[in-house]
Amino acid sequence: MASGEQIGFIGLGTMGEPMALNLRRAGQSLMVWNRTAERTAPLREAGAKVAADVDDLFAQCTTVLLMLENEAATDAVLGRDTEAFTHRVAGHCIVSMGTTSAKYSQGLSQDIAAADGRFVEAPVSGSRKPAEAGQLVGMLAGPPEEVERLRPMLSPICKQLFDCGTVPGALQMKLAVNTFLITMVTGLAEAAHFAARHGLDMDRFADILNAGPMASDVSRVKIDKLRIQDFSRQAGISDVLKNSRLVLEAARAAGTASPLMNVCEALYAETEAMGRDEDDMIAVVQAIEARIRRSAS
């Protein structure tokens, strides 16, 4: 459901572009900005306004959605620790939809509140394909009145939105979800490696998995990519490595065990070191294969 106000959207990368396009297709009045200016072209063609610069967007939009790569990019856009910060966030609702550490998000929330702004966490679960289909799952944390106001605004992006209480509840929930996602996909890659090494029919392997009780939307997409060795990016290796490290950081802070994530983090780091950082996360199978080659040498 589109709102009457013009909202701002910053960060038009792998996930941000389809999310912003879904807002426009739903009729939402939208202004966008991206550090790499050419990425704004599809949004301009879809009828969104393109801000001349970051300050232009904050001047014209009181609700600003951020889908940024990391904490440093978020701080840069908001002008944190500079005089620009108060001008950009005062009287605004800042909605962070990317994945950062819970500790960072809590600190940012406090700084925005001190500058007379409002902050909502809204991380999403899903990759490029569900982002294009408007089928992401959103987790919300922040002032209850802002969370409720944002629900209809975010409905073109998310098939479901869940209230996770106060900041940093949404990011802690996202990291718990990511723990399952990352270990599941890594396990699928290892299973495919096992099947291939035994000379099994990979089409039959995929059919059996897809017919079984473990099948999911994610597994169906990833097994097909493994079957045909398609490593084109949906959720990139570098992003998954970042998320793995955020999970481990949060686990250490809470004193929780993370044996599977420890292994996954090592495998994604090895995959990135192979120059596969822009490939889809399923390319982790390449690191598994490399371990065999190293043990044989």
Image (cartoon, rainbow, N blue to C red):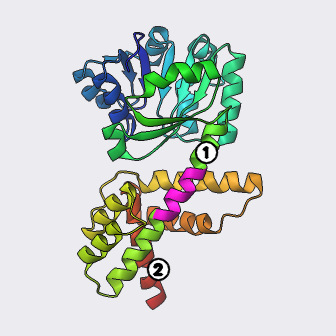
Q: Which residue is mark 2?
A: 291
Q: Which residues are magenta?
A: 176-184
Residue 183 part of the magenta-drawn span? yes
Q: Which residue is mark 1?
A: 173
Q: Check the image and report above or below for 279 versus 93.
A: below
What residue is rendered at 62% in x and 25% in y?
A: 80
Q: Nearer the viewer, residue 275 or 158?
A: 158
Q: Is residue 106 visible?
A: yes
Our reading of the magenta stretch's main secondary structure is: helix
Amino acid type, callout 2 = Arg
Q: Check the image and report above or below for 89 versus 266.
A: above
Disc ID at residue 15: none
Q: Nearer the viewer, residue 48 or 188?
A: 188
Residue 120: x and y in percent read 59, 27
Residue 287: x and y in percent read 44, 72
Residue 151 part of the magenta-drawn span? no
- Location of the N terminus by quadrant is top left
Compared across the picture, whether 7 is left or right of 202 comes to right
Q: Check the image and report above or below for 151 versus 200.
A: above
- Give the class, few, some or many, for how many residues have Cα within 10 Å of label 1's Cα (few <14, many ≥20): some
Query: Toward which corner of the image does residue 111 lie, by quadrant?
Result: top right
Compared across the picture, whether 209 is left or right of 287 comes to left
Q: Nearer the viewer, residue 152 or 83?
A: 152
Q: Is residue 297 visible?
A: no
Q: Secondary structure at mark 2?
A: helix
Amino acid type, callout 1 = Met
Residue 132: x and y in percent read 31, 39
